[in-house]
Image: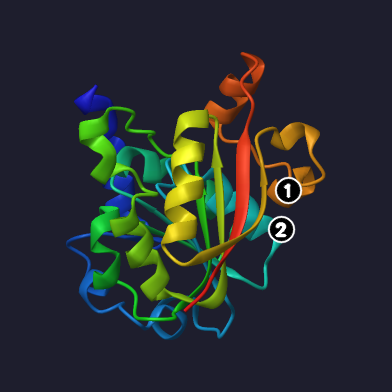
Amino acid sequence: MARRKLPRFEYNAQSSNVIERGKEIYTSIKGKWREKYFENSNPIVLELACGKGEYTVGLAQIFPDKNFIGIDIKGDRIARGSKRANDLALNNVAFLRTPMVFLEEFFVENEIDEIWLIHPDPQPRDKEERKRLTNSRYLELYKKILKNDGDFLFKTDNFDLFEYSLESIASSGYNILRETNDLYNSPMLNEHYGIETHYEKLFVSKGYKINYLAAKNIK
């Protein structure tokens, strides 16, 4: 398995759309994404725990006038998104390899216009609560880098995580605008732009309902 990942790690090292440790830009990009990477003043959208970057790439194709950054710690997954973005010649895409807990090392306050969190690991055991990406400690990080009135969009197939997240997101100072326990049979279906991750397709094929919410950051 590790041997199969090596070519992807090498790909990341050579790909200009991957920001990772060992590259000069990794330590100098904070607060300068528009200036140093995108070279425009367009809005910046994050996909947290992006995996293979299905949303990062999919949204970038739909919205060429926005900048998209997929963030994950798994280099082999990022390589797949990076290659797809390169194959499509998308210059409004970047991938950042880092744990979510270090977001403030790469973004300044109010730098981000929109955040997507798509099917994160539910971390179902009670002792794993602090690892959930909708735990209050993470939500506070997002609030700092997300501009006032910035959008926070969340999807999960896990009902328990969704119920937990509804409470934690609201109590962390976000205004939940819309929510559904069955996205595919709701008026909000168009809000996900028909983009499905690999795992979402599996979940839906097995009869799982997709939970979704849209919220605003209130400072």
Is residue 119 something that shows in the picture? no
Secondary-structure class at tag 1? loop
| Dot 2 crowding, Cα within 10 Å, few <14, some 14–19, many 20+ | few
Of 127 and 154, nearer the camera is 127
Secondary-structure class at tag 2? helix
Q: Residue at x 35, y 82 (%)?
A: 31
Earlier in the chain: of badge 1 and badge 2, it is 2
Q: Is residue 14 left or right of residue 53?
A: left
**Residue tagged by mark 2?**
62
Q: Position of residue 89 (x, y in %)?
A: 59, 58
Q: Quadrant of residue 43?
A: bottom right
Give the Cα separation between the discs numbered 1 and 2: 9 Å
Q: Quadrant of residue 121?
A: top left
Of 122 and 111, nearer the camera is 122
Vertical side of 75 occupied by 124: above or below: above
Contact? badges 1 and 2 (CB < 8 Å):
yes
Q: Residue at x 44, y 47 (%)?
A: 50
**Residue tagged by mark 1?**
193
From the viewer's perspective, is the residue at label 1 or at label 2 nearer?
1
Of 97 and 216, nearer the camera is 216
Residue furthest out toward the left: 22
Q: Residue at x 27, y 73 (%)?
A: 25
Q: Amino acid at mark 2?
A: Ile
Q: Amino acid at mark 1?
A: Tyr
Q: Position of residue 174 (x, y in %)?
A: 51, 65
Q: Position of residue 168 (x, y in %)?
A: 42, 52
